[in-house]
Amino acid sequence: MPVEIPPPSGGAPVVEAWAPASIATPPAPVADAGRPSDATRQPATARAAPPVPAAEAAWSAPLVETLPRPEVAPAAEAASGTAFYAPLAEAPPRPPLAPSAPAPAALPAASPSEPAAVATTAPLPAGHTATSADTTAAAPAPQPGTEPRQGWFSRLKAGLARSTAKLTDSVTTLFRKRRLDEEALEELEETLIAADLGVAASRRIVEGFRKTRFGKEVTDEEVKATLAEEIAAILAPVAQPLVIEPARAPHVVLVVGVNGTGKTTTIAKLGRQYREAGLKTGFVAGDTFRAAAVEQLQVWADRTGARFFPPAKPGADAAGLAFDALGTARAEGLDVLLVDTAGRLHNKSALMEELRKVIRVIRRVDETAPHSVLLVLDATTGQNAVQQVKVFKEMVDVSGLAVTKLDGSAKGGVVVALAQEFGLPVHVVGVGEKAEDLRPFEARDYARGLLGLE
């Protein structure tokens, strides 16, 4: 029953309710510790926890889930209701709020054979509250070095993507279930020429279609597959690697081409591959008029461990440098000597004469040198590459081709035109900046990559 407590200094009396033991509601804390105890007051330590309505307990469960889970035996856990400390992944769905809803049953402890719900989840930082994102099972992160490496064909296909789109978009438009008649063949030839395959190669391919598929109903996929076969047949005879002959040691490779085709970079990539094959390699910085080219080649020589032959001064005579380098290379037993040259326009006869002078001078040391003359072509120039080959072939007797920058061009079909026109070996093709992006030329892979086929 209520008890009145007189105020210390007058005023209205304070009424305090003393709860009997049968009432579950706990009294508010009283600051006066010296108050005499009442027989009807139940001690706080012995007072039972108030019952919570079932619906309210289910609704408020997430508030309890954020607490740390204590170490409780499974039987005691079920009896004491500590199952609500389970992670969110184990919590039952929230029931609708209704007075008559039953309280959720305690969850059984996980079987030892069952994996824990958070086994694939990283430990949470201190003080972090679990969320659905934290408890979502995730695949283990790949270990360094276990990611699958992209193969050469995949890189080649990706590098030819622009050329593929230029060629196949037109083919797909032309041949959606269409009969291969004369009109269709004429349109196909125009498409191939526009894709930089050249007039001669385009006519050869169309003639192949006329002999084998004329009058038949074809689809775009059938046309692509047949095109890849025809292109591979043209490229197969020129797909020849650049063979280094140990008997000629050092095997001299003279690298030529117009400005900006990537001669110095090609030398660096080839040199790295030769060094990895165990060959003793030397770089001759024959582009003496361009300091940046000399510095670039020296950096690559340091990285690959190649012997470096720099000019005595900027603008030094390239022929004299090549002469001295070849003599030293023979004395030191080098296997390969890659000679860089200044970029020169194919229509400048004076510059071309200087290149011929380099060849004449090094033949004083070895009358069979250079053993290979590698013409580097930039694929972005398209049909202009055909004219470059004509002039360089007449001036310095080009023995093979390297086609670079295919990844930055939609003119990858020019390789087909070069193969049909000159029949010169295509030693390597490049589709990127890394050393592994310059690889020996393979006819079938190139043809299928050009058509976007697997």
Image: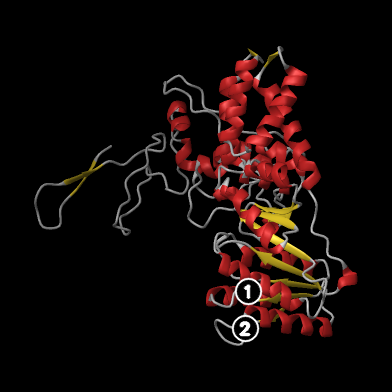
Q: Report x, y in % for residue 151.
A: 72, 48
Of residues 273 and 25, the one nearer the viewer is 273
Secondary structure of the residue carrying numbered label 2:
loop
Residue 297's disc is 1
Query: Considering the image in quadrants, where does the C terminus appear?
Result: top right
Residue in the picture at 78% in, 67% down: 274
Determine which quarter of the picture holds residue 42. top left
Q: Report x, y in % for residue 73.
A: 67, 45
Where 184 falls versus 73 (above or below)? Answer: above
In the displayed structure, does residue 235 sit left or right of residue 180? right
Q: Report x, y in % for residue 195.
A: 58, 36
State the separation of the CA atoms marked 2 and 1.
Answer: 12 Å
Where 305 falls versus 216 (above or below)? Answer: below
* Tally of numbered discs: 2
Residue in the picture at 29% in, 57% down: 32
The residue singled out by tag 2 in the image is: 311
Where 250 falls versus 204 (above or below)? Answer: below
Residue in the picture at 37% in, 44% down: 41
Closer to us: mark 2 or mark 1? 2
Q: In the image, what residue type sits under mark 2? A: Pro
